[in-house]
């Protein structure tokens, strides 16, 4: 029996569904997942010795590819000095200064151990700061798995049906208004109906958890204006896009200043890290300065800070974003030619190193249009890519990620596989 299959059987006995995060299970694909034992650069190796060109990138963090030397060395050096101290450490100050320098809207920042904690804490802070209870999120945007945010969420929750999760009390979910993305009128109406009750809008500025799609021109600017008008906070959830699409995320590309920003994935360099930050007067409402409680035993952990700092430094040093754009453009060019020749309906969305291939003829601008993607074509494409050693996410509602470790040859091999996968 292949080793992965055996591992999966053992896993299913002692771990629910055999996995520690649901999308890893390949359930909708109806195939057992493979177990990875090693990964270097753009390549994964599984327990049976098979190799894959990886476009999952550990779901976002691996922007320099897997096990980049600078990050691994930084972690090794930090580990020798101790794993966790429970006191402030110098690396946290370096990390906070780096984030504040790169993301101008962030005047103060607090570290967490995951993106989920960052968004959950940002929501609590928005409620505490404004004294209001309702929040607005958009269908298909995923902000981690805390109760208030697990309503019409994307990512693994999408293949779940609604409500997204048992165990989220209706009364809690009722405070979360879910609106379609890219629909200005829906937002206007919500602010009219709940005048003075809305604490914040939380949005993935470029949604990457229901596939990947983009705001209509002026939409993000509109969200900035209307929240300011109504005394609500604007939270950009840049856990996925932060440091990936530009040194200052989507807000840098648009020149928008959100009140709060959540970060994760890339800033951890592969270790468990999240962060939320923004306007100093808002951030100062957090304990110990203010009444909004927020804490974490391992927050700002020295290994995680070392990994994240090393990754951010390297990204800046090599100006990773122009390299990622050129690799992304090469992939996009090739995909467009192949799909066009295959006479299949498709929409390819991309910005820099984030991309998604939808099998639908109509433009994708929100969750509803994303869900028109043809699942049967997707499943065939996924399995044929996998059999040719190309790992794309096992769901049509996930973003693909390119890293600086991908070579032109990797992209070309991927295109070659694609031409046999449709
Ligand atoms: C991944 C993600 C999260 C959750 O982060 P975790 O570290 O998985 O808890 C939140 N928001 C967005 C936009 C994400 O992509």
Image (spheres, rainbow, N blue to C red):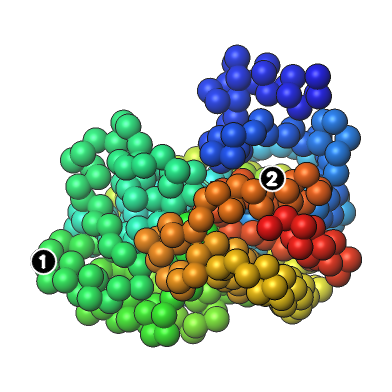
* Residue 324's disc number: none
The vertical placement of 32 against 236, above or below, is: above
Q: Nearer the viewer, residue 82 or 348?
A: 348
Dot 2 lies on which element?
Answer: helix
Q: Position of residue 8 (x, y in %)?
A: 68, 23
The vertical placement of 326 against 203, above or below, is: below
Q: Is residue 305 visible?
A: no
**Figure quadrant of residue 7:** top right
Rendered residue at 32%/42% (across/down): 162
In this view, the mark in front (2 or 1) = 2
Rendered residue at 10%/66% (across/down): 193
Question: On the picture, is 418 further left or further right than 205?
Answer: right
Question: On the picture, is 57 further left or further right than 147?
Answer: right
Residue beneath disc 2: 383
Residue beneath disc 1: 193
Q: Nearer the viewer, residue 54 or 78?
A: 54
The vertical placement of 46 against 122, above or below, is: above
Q: Is residue 210 visible?
A: yes
Q: Position of residue 214 (x, y in %)?
A: 48, 73
């Amino acid at each position: 029996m292949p080793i992965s299959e055996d591992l999966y059987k053992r896993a299913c006995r002692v771990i629910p569904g055999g996995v520690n995060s649901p999308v890893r299970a390949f359930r909708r694909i109806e195939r057992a997942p493979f177990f990875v034992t090693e990964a270097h650069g753009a390549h994964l190796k599984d327990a049976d010795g098979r190799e894959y060109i990886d476009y999952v990138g550990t779901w976002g963090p691996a922007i320099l590819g897997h096990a980049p030397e600078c990050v691994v060395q930084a972690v090794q050096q930090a580990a020798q000095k101790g794993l966790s101290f429970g006191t402030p450490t110098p690396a946290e100050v370096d990390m906070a200064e780096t984030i504040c320098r790169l993301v101008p809207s962030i005047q103060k920042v607090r570290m967490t151990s995951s993106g989920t904690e960052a968004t959950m804490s940002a929501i609590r802070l928005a409620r505490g700061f404004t004294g209001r209870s309702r929040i607005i999120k958009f269908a298909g945007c995923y902000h981690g798995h805390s109760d208030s945010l697990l309503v019409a969420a994307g990512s693994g929750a999408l293949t779940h049906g609604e409500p997204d999760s048992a165990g989220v009390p209706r009364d809690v979910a009722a405070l979360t208004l879910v609106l379609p993305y890219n629909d200005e009128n829906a937002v206007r109406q919500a602010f009219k109906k709940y005048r003075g009750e809305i604490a914040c809008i939380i949005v993935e500025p470029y949604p990457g958890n229901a596939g990947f799609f983009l705001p209509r021109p002026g939409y993000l600017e509109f969200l900035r204006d209307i929240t300011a008008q109504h005394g609500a906070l604007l939270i950009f959830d840049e856990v996925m896009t932060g440091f990936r699409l530009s040194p200052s995320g989507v807000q840098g590309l648009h020149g928008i200043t959100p009140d709060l920003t959540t970060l994760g994935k890339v800033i951890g360099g592969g270790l468990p890290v999240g962060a939320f930050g923004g306007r100093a007067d808002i951030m100062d409402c957090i304990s110990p300065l203010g009444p909004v409680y927020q804490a974490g035993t391992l927050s700002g952990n020295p290994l995680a800070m070392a990994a994240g700092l090393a990754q951010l430094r390297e990204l800046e040093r090599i100006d990773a974003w122009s390299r990622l754009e050129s690799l992304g453009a090469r992939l996009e060019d090739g995909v467009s030619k192949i799909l066009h020749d295959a006479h299949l309906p498709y929409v390819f969305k991309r910005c820099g190193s984030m991309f998604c291939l939808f099998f639908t003829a109509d433009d994708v601008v929100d969750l509803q249009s994303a869900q028109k993607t043809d699942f049967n074509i997707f499943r065939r494409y996924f399995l044929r890519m996998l059999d040719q050693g190309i790992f794309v996410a096992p769901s049509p509602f996930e973003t693909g990620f390119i890293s600086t470790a991908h070579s032109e040859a990797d992209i070309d091999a991927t295109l070659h596989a694609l031409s046999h996968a449709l």
